[in-house]
Amino acid sequence: METSDAFWRQILESDQGRSIFSIYSDIDGHIGECQLMFDGMRGAEISLLIGRKDVWHQGYGTSALIELLDVVFKCHLLKRAWTRVPKIN
């Protein structure tokens, strides 16, 4: 984890078909991440993970999803978004 910010920026920004966002809480810091994977046909698959179980069921996932949908439809002007939810979830 002792990699420079410039290295991570290069890795995260090099894939034009994907946008990755961190999810932060003012109180708990970094609690998860979400991604948009663009399909090249004005759509994107959404992936969202709240990795800290101690902050589950506090609305962070819902808030992150609402913000991500704003990015999809207002910033990128895409036509559709979807996600896949594993049966175990």
Image (cartoon, rainbow, N blue to C red):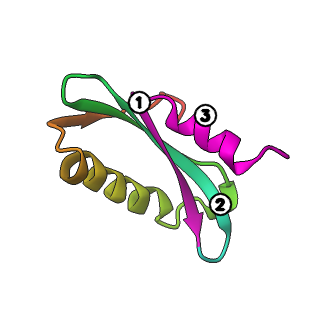
- Reply yes or no: does residue 30 show up in magenta: no
Q: Which residue is mark 3?
A: 11
User: Tag 1's secondary structure?
Assistant: loop
Circle 1 residue: 16
Determine which residue is flagged by label 2: 30
Q: Amino acid at mark 1?
A: Gln
Give the residue at x 19% y 30%: 42
Closest to the observer, 55 or 45? 45
Secondary structure at badge 3 equals: helix
Which residue is found at the position 19% from the left and 23% from the top? 41
Instruction: Tell me the residue at 25%/36% (across/down).
Output: 81
Closer to the chain start, of discs 1 and 2, is: 1
Left or right, 79 with reference to 19: left
Q: Residue furthest top?
A: 40
Q: Position of residue 1 (x, y in %)?
A: 83, 44
The residue located at (51%, 31%) in the rendering is: 14
Q: Please state which amino acid type lies under the numbered disc 2.
A: His
Would you say residue 24 sits in the magenta stretch?
A: yes
Q: Earlier in the sequence, mark 2 or mark 3?
A: 3
